[in-house]
Image (cartoon, rainbow, N blue to C red):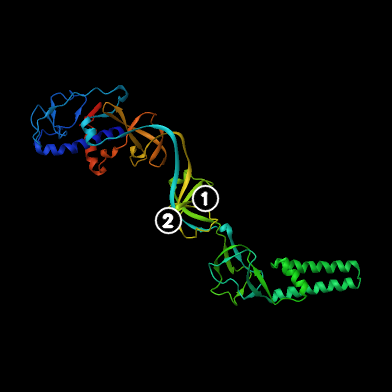
Amino acid sequence: MTAKRLFTVVLTVAALAAAAIAIRHIGARTEGESPEIHSSVDSGAAGLYTCGMHPQVMLEGPGQCPICGMNLTPIESRPAPPAAAAGPGVHVSRNFLQNFAVRTAIVERADLPARIRTIGYLEHDEARLVSVHTKFEGWIERPRVNIVGETVSKGEVLFEIYSPDLVAVQEEFLAEIAFVDRLREMEAYPGAVSRAEAHLQAAEDRLRRWDLTSQQIEHLRAAGKASRTVEVYSPGSGYVVDKQAESLEGIKAVPGTTILTIADHSTLWAKVEFFEHHLEDLRVGLTADISLDAFPRRRWRGRLLFFEPSMSPETQTLTGYVEVENSDGRLRPKMYATIEIQLPGAKDALIVPAQAVLRSGKGRDIVIIDAGNGIFVPREIELGIESEGLVHVSEGLAEGERVVTSSQFLLDSESNLQAAVDRLADSTVGGHLHVH
């Protein structure tokens, strides 16, 4: 069944429902006769009378309204449909339009900004997470930072560590220094001095590879004695967000094991979920507006950084990450946020109110055209983006046409309509239906 025929039937059923009240008062009529609907091939409204208070009542000849008792008045003849409305459509009386408050809107050409509004929560910026670990075995002593949530600065002492291996490397470094000095005092063969200096440099490089700073190495050279423990410094600034144990005092540090994790919160990531129908319009780099209930009068700006490589099979959504600037530190990880992604939108597009579109559920979208003089024509359209209560119509409409925006008065339960559709489809011969 075509969309146009279905629209005709829906209007017909709407009118029949209104007529049911009158039928109960008027009594039984001849089987198959409808007092509400007359084909345009009939003689129009000639000889029909209606009630000003109950326009659904229509009788042949004068008389009184069976509902309120008022005198019936003759129905005026209807004008012929205009040429622009030729084809399948319906003619609706003025009383019907008033009773159902039918509203229309003009198809306009304008820019349609678009955005996606979703909910997410804040997380650490993984690019600003640093791990504190050692490249040698040892035991932590005198931890200066021992609580998750503490703030640290880059270069701040985190703890001291005792490592027999590190003590041995220090002693090797000091021995190489002493050997070079002795060769120079003896005015040894230059080649021997050069080889000794190379061994000294190798010992110093080993200390650097184990993350001793230049200042620590110079202090070791000046002291001339290996230090039992060495200080470990923070590689970055931020909050301590994780640690190896409840207390760091005395725990064994193993190469590759993270002792502390430090997060820089000057930027955060908002983790958001996008449904499949959003993916066509999304791309990395789009601007985002972020708002939180905790700060109702503030807005943060961000940008879409990247997407995870696959959809979630449970929710059928794609996870994306939005970078959020947080220089004042007001935002915290795990806070919920509302994220609005700014889309390119549609430029110089034909737009109509979204409520004007009748969605069939079968991939077809229809609007009702107000062709004037009470003539309404259904038309199938192609849709673009939808935003802020408006929708872009890419095909099917022209600028200046008028569409019905209160189409909900046409709707009824599909299951209730189906029987009527089956009965009336074959009886709709053509022309226009007149609905009162």
- Tag 1: amino acid: Gly
Q: Is residue 297 left or right of residue 128?
A: left
- Label 2's element? loop
Q: Quarter-wise, where is residue 195 in the image?
A: bottom right
Circle count:
2
Spatial distance from mark 1 to mark 2, Cα to Cα?
A: 17 Å
Q: Quadrant of the C terminus?
A: top left
**Quick check: 172 above or below 270?**
below
| Residues packed near mark 1 inside 10 Å, few (<14), some (14 to 19) or many (20 plus) | many
* Residue 16 image offset from top left, x and y in percent: 19, 36
Q: Is residue 3 visible?
A: yes
Image depth: mark 1 or mark 2 in front: 2
Where does residue 37 sit, x and y in percent of width and height?
19, 31
Q: Earlier in the sequence, mark 1 or mark 2?
A: 2
**Residue where numbered disc 1 is placed:** 302
Q: Position of residue 104 (x, y in %)?
A: 31, 33
Using the rendered view, name the quadrant where residue 1 is placed.
Answer: top left
Asked if the residue at tag 2 contacts the one at tag 1, i.e. Cβ–Cβ closer than 8 Å, the answer is: no
Residue 413, image x and y in percent? 25, 43
Please give the residue where the numbered disc 2 appears in the rendered image.
293
> In the image, is 222 to the left or to the right of 252?
right
Q: Which mark is residue 241?
A: none
The residue drawn where x is 46% and y is 59% is 335
Q: Residues within 10 Å of mark 2 (few under 14, many from 20)?
A: few
| Direction from residue 76 to residue 182 in the image, left or right | right
Q: Residue at x 25, y 27 (%)?
A: 432
Going by the image, does 293 lie left or right of 308? left
User: Looking at the picture, which amino acid does disc 2 mark?
Assistant: Asp
Tell me the element at label 1. Answer: strand
Residue visible at 85% across and 72% down?
181
Q: Is residue 278 above or below residue 242?
A: above
Name the residue: 58% across, 57% down: 127
